[in-house]
Amino acid sequence: MENSIYLDEARDPLIIAEGWMKDGKDVAIATVVETWGSAPRPVGSHLVIDADGNFHGSVSGGCVEGAVVSEAIDVIDSGKARMLEFGVADETAWQVGLSCGGRIKVYVERLG
Amino acid sequence: MDPYALKTLNAERRARRAAILVTDLGDGRDRIVREGDHVAGDLGTAIARAFRTGNSGSVEAEGRTFFLNAHLPQPRLVVIGAVHISQALAPMAKIAGYPVEIIDPRTAFATPDRFPDVALHAEWPEDVLKRQPLDSYTALAAVTHDPKVDDFALKAALDANCFYVGALGSRKTHAKRVERLLALGASADQIARIHAPIGLDIGAASPGEIAVAVLAQAIHAFRSRGLDAKGAAA
């Protein structure tokens, strides 16, 4: 386990989101707010997305990021936050799928 | 998320200070709470717990659902003294999740050969701590037995409110140390925070066992932050 005592600014999603904001980009922030079972990323993890679909960070091991990015672009347009749920019990889960068998809840909101 | 909240949060994180982003999941409004800020009621209790554990999560309070995202700085351990105990302590602390730095101006002790894979400074604590100041998410263990090396770092650790301060030496040695630290301007309350003799009392005898006792004491201090006035009396 490698723990850096300082922020890894080049890879830190919230630092990147702030940089995008300063560049005048529209940004959405997705946050894991709940997990059940073997979820790959802990509660509090972030994925940040710009209006062009560029993203940094992760809310799963790559399983649902694509779906979160497309929802995030809608959130940037509408300004309305959304709560997304992914997991084996969910219809969409079979399509975007958490292969680990866990379930996660992801809150997606616009910055500003 | 409020852009101002994001800027504030990132500034706190860069400065290695703890902060919690509190988001009302009903209306999306958010705010930053810093460690030590007073928040009343059930929400305040949940926030205090999140600062202590570092765990994020949802909480029901005042008929609303809040998400608390806890951002704690990475806790770390600074060891003054590249001695036998430090050779055992460095890998153990790293495994436990506490990155280690070792400072010892005595170049015969502070060699990469004796300390592979550790951030090692063969310099005086005065010089290293000027570049990389101590803070409240740093533990300091002074284990050289040499006042010339240990004392400055101990005083700096007390002033920076390190979450753990430990010093190797018998009660008699520590009594003399207390006199010196008072002369350096430390208050009696500050000095009372020093764990000396160092380490939990597990009857540790070998350098490896003493390292276990020191690491356990530092972890206890970290996990009981804010639970009593003294921080962590072990």
Image (cartoon, helix red, strand yellow):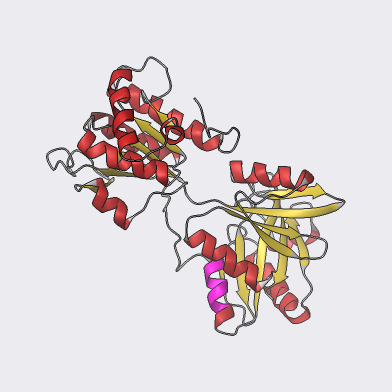
Q: Is residue B232 left or right of residue B129?
A: right
Q: Quadrant of residue B8?
A: bottom right
- B214 relative to A12, above or below: above
In this rendering, would B139 be left or right of A20?
left
Q: Camera-side residue: B223 or A28? A: B223
Q: Given the current orientation, which residue lies at the most extreme bottom position?
A: A24
- Queried whether the magenta region covers residue A15, the answer comes back as yes
Q: Quadrant of residue B204?
A: top left
Residue drawn 51% across the image and 64% down it: A12
Percent from the top left, x then y, of residue B21? 66, 58
In-front residue for pair B38/A78: B38
Q: Is residue A88 visible?
A: yes
**Mainly helix, strand or loop, the magenta region?**
helix
Q: Where does residue B185 sit, x and y in percent of width and height?
A: 35, 40
**Residue at x-position 72% and y-position 69%:** A109
Residue depicted at x 54% and y 51%:
B72
Report the magenta residues as a range.
A14-20
Q: On the rendered image, what quadrant is the N terminus of chain B found in?
A: bottom right
Name the residue furthest left. Answer: B108
Q: Nearer the viewer, residue A34 or B46?
A: B46
Q: Residue A42's x, y, as percent?
A: 61, 50
Q: Quadrant of residue B64?
A: bottom right
Residue B102, placed above or below residue A70:
above
